[in-house]
Image (cartoon, rainbow, N blue to C red):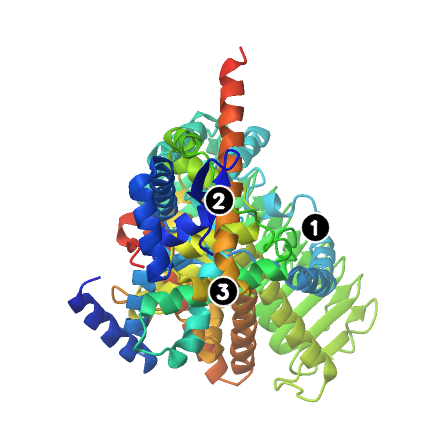
């Protein structure tokens, strides 16, 4: 390859560039190299070329080896972009199936049932929780809720994207969000509040021209409350008149008087002898309505023990009970799930149909006046292993979980993978899960009772519900990786197992397998229940750990970049 | 890397071969950065480089058993990485410079060294990297293999699938293309400065 070129009309002879380059790289044979070296001693032009080429090599090498760009954190922390569209195709297919199943199996029937008992589909949430009970000027309040929801979502979005938004300060962002939340208009909240009273009595003839909120041991209303009544106490007795709604928390609620609005009772025992203008919603262990009692609209009942309905209910009933004894008037449809017994007495009279689901046949008195025979569905406790529908439902259940996890994985891969990594720390995750799963809920409920915190509390409860649902998905992924992803371990860095494994495809596969295994285990009686609870707590703890580490990024291990050693 | 480091690395590789996760972690921490940078120089986008880095380490899990411990580990690792990146580029059908025709017709020239010096005077390492990004895949890969990983001509020939004798020509042509890109950048920069 060694060549001398004739240059500039043949008067000067120089070595060509490639020979000079090979000389510099030590690739020439010894005689040629010696010859070239001797030539460059004499030829300034070739010498200069050699220097220029050497300089170019050095500049190239420096340019290539310069560490101007840090190794991306997600190389250690999370998966990277997958280019296969199959996951999306499968996702959309399964999502469509899942949505259809959810709609036809739960949402549509639930809405129909709710409508039967007086809740319109548009105001279900507001009716259950707030309808003219806590706040006046609901539209203003609604704007606050919306504002807080938007702020919450913005904070979450910022939180997830914070790696990309390092120029912003998290604290500044959160503080701004809080200021915005505080700056939003707050609805008027006039109410008369009585706290720490062992016995509160509103005597007959007395009138409270406002909402009344009472914290006390026993609360007795013999007079009139021209507004809503909210009580937190052991016993509540209403002999008088409440023109608004009643919300009660306590051991015993006894209503003999008149409530023009709705009653929402969270009591151990609810006795009802009076008149309710609108709806009754009860979460209780025992409920009894007397024959002279009247409910103007419908009843939604969650009764752990006995429910005895002897009074008049003008619209429908939606009830989940252990024992149900119906011996009064019902103007609409009755949808009942009663685990242990259902009795229709001789005084019963219904204008709509009765749909009953339970484990035993109902006992219907021959004297009862029913619009149609009771539609009965007897539940068989054991799973019908041979029914195709069972497997189909299981598959759809798995599919809905898979879709949810997939969406989460695609939206926030770093967060997802980090949470799965945190699940590796079983003890810490489980302990934290046990602690936070209850603590977060309690705090959120407590925040709901503050004036400004209502929206934040509700948003937190909704997020808590989502976290509860998705916590087992992280454990499923962890399990899937344990089963088939051992090779995808990169190893242990600073005592911490690292799974940077990159393919979303592989990760999705592991997640799908893990979820399948967990769902299969959940079908085993007793063991499945225990495993489900364990996965829930464990996953929730891992999630909490991730959130904690995101808030305190100093805790997570930084990636040290090794110098080029080649 | 000094002798004790080499010894430590050899021990780490031995442990990794037995499935020791701590050892895998050490290897990853030691080499993830250099391999990512190698991929970053060779491939088009950062995302591609990230994908490739993790894929290479996954391959490493499978191939470590085949590693001949008498050879330098870094060189072997870069060989694995280079093969992976080159395969990746070929899979994407980047054809514009994969052909080997014309290599032999490279004219044997003696460029004006003063012009070359003038060009180099005006360049920083960043401009050099920017110009490298504009090169065709094979030219870029050849330069990266030679000047980032210090691969021999034999290894470059094996990786790029060209005859050993033509590696020098491939590298020289790559340098010429790089100079053209640098000249183009300089001209663009001058035009931008002159534009009011």
Q: In this view, does B63 lie above or below A176?
A: below
Residue located beneath label 2 in the image = A5
Q: Residues within 10 Å of mark 2 (few under 14, many from 20)?
A: some
Q: Which residue is drawn at 50% across and 50% down?
A: B140
Q: Could you give the CA–CA distance between mark 3 and mark 2, rounded to whole angstroms?
A: 23 Å
User: Horizontal placement of A346 versus B21: left or right?
Assistant: right
Whether pointer 3 and pointer 2 mark residues with C-beta atoms closer than 8 Å, the reply is no
Residue located beneath label 1 in the image = A118
Task: Tell me residue A110's x, y (percent).
Answer: 69, 59
Q: Residue furthest left?
A: B4
Which of labels 3 and 1 is toward the front? 3
Quarter of the rendering containing residue A414:
bottom left
Q: Could you give the CA–CA distance between mark 3 and mark 1, rounded to whole angstroms?
A: 85 Å
Q: What element carries label 2?
A: strand
Chain for numbered disc 3: B
Q: What element carries label 1?
A: loop
Task: Tell me residue A452's x, y (percent).
Answer: 42, 34
Which of labels 2 and 1 is toward the front? 2
Residue located beneath label 3 in the image = B164
Q: What element carries label 3?
A: helix
Discs 3 and 1 carry the same chain letter = no
Q: Which of B13 and B90 is in front in this view?
A: B90
Q: Could you give the CA–CA distance between mark 2 and mark 1, rounded to whole angstroms?
A: 100 Å
Q: In this view, does A59 lie above or below A544?
A: above
Chain for numbered disc 2: A
Chain for numbered disc 1: A
Task: Tell me residue B75's x, y (percent).
Answer: 36, 66
Residue A351 seen? yes
């Amino acid at each position: 390859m060694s060549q001398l070129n004739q240059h500039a009309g043949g008067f000067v002879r120089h070595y060509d560039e490639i020979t000079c380059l090979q000389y510099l790289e030590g690739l020439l044979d010894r005689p040629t190299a010696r010859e070239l070296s001797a030539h460059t001693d004499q030829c300034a032009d070739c010498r200069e070329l050699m220097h220029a080429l050497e300089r170019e090599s050095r500049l190239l090498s420096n340019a290539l080896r310069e560490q101007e760009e840090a190794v991306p954190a997600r190389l250690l922390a999370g998966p990277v972009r997958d280019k296969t569209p199959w996951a999306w195709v499968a996702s959309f297919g399964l999502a469509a199936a899942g949505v259809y199943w959810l709609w036809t199996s739960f949402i549509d029937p639930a809405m129909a049932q709710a409508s039967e008992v007086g809740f319109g589909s548009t105001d279900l949430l507001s009716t259950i929780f707030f309808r003219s009970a806590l706040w006046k000027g609901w539209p203003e309040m609604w704007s606050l809720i919306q504002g807080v929801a938007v702020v919450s979502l913005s904070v979450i979005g910022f939180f997830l994207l914070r790696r990309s938004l390092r120029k912003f300060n998290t604290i500044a962002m959160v503080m701004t969000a809080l200021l915005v939340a505080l700056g939003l208009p707050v609805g008027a909240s006039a109410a008369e509040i009585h706290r720490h009273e062992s016995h509160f009595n509103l005597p007959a003839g007395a009138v409270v021209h406002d909402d009344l909120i009472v914290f006390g041991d026993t609360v007795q209303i013999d007079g009139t409350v021209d507004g809503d009544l909210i009580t937190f106490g052991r016993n509540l007795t209403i002999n008088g008149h409440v023109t608004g709604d009643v919300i009660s928390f306590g051991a015993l609620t006894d209503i003999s008087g008149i409530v023009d609005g709705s009653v929402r009772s969270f009591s151990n025992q609810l006795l009802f002898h009076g008149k309710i203008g609108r709806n009754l919603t009860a979460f209780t262990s025992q409920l009894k309505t007397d024959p002279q009692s009247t409910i103007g609209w419908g009843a939604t009942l969650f009764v752990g023990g006995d429910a005895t309905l002897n009074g008049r209910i003008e619209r429908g009933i939606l009830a989940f009970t252990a024992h149900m004894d119906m011996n009064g008037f019902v103007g609409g449809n009755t949808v009942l799930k009663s685990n242990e017994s259902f009795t229709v007495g001789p005084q019963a009279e219904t204008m709509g149909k009765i749909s009953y689901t339970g484990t035993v046949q109902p006992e219907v008195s021959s004297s009862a006046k029913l619009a149609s025979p009771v539609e009965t569905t007897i539940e068989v406790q054991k799973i019908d292993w041979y029914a195709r529908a069972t497997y189909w439902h299981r598959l759809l259940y798995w599919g809905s979980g898979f879709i949810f996890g997939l969406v989460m994985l695609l939206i926030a891969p770093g967060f997802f993978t980090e949470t799965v990594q945190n699940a590796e720390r079983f003890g810490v995750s489980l302990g934290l899960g046990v602690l936070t799963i209850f603590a977060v809920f309690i705090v959120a409920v407590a925040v709901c009772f503050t004036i400004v915190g209502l929206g934040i509390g509700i948003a937190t409860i909704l997020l808590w519900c989502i976290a509860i649902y998705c916590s087992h998905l992280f454990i499923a992924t962890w399990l899937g990786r344990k089963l088939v992803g051992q090779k995808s371990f990169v190893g242990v860095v600073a005592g911490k197992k690292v799974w940077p494994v990159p393919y979303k495809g592989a990760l999705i596969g592991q997640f799908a397998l893990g979820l399948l295994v967990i769902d299969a285990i959940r079908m085993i009686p007793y063991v499945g229940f225990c495993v489900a609870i364990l996965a829930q707590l464990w996953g929730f703890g891992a999630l909490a750990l991730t959130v904690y580490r995101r808030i305190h990024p100093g805790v997570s291990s930084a990636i040290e970049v090794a110098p080029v050693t080649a | 890397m000094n002798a004790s480091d080499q010894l430590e690395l050899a021990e780490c590789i031995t442990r990794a071969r037995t499935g020791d996760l701590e050892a895998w972690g050490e290897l990853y921490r030691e080499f993830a950065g250099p391999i990512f940078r190698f991929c970053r120089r060779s491939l088009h986008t950062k995302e591609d480089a990230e994908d490739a880095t993790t894929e290479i380490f996954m391959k490493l899990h499978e191939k470590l058993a085949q590693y001949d411990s008498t050879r330098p580990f870094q060189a072997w690792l870069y060989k694995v990485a280079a093969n992976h990146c080159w395969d990746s580029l070929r899979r994407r059908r980047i054809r514009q410079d994969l052909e080997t025709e014309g290599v032999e017709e490279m004219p044997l020239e003696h460029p004006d060294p003063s012009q070359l010096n003038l060009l180099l005077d005006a360049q920083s390492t960043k401009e050099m990297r920017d110009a490298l990004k504009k090169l065709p895949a094979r030219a870029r890969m050849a330069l990266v293999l030679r000047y980032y990983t210090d691969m021999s001509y034999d290894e470059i020939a094996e990786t790029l699938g060209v005859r050993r004798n033509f590696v020098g020509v491939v590298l020289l042509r790559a340098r010429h293309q790089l100079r053209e890109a640098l000249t183009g950048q300089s001209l663009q920069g001058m035009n931008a400065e002159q534009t009011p």
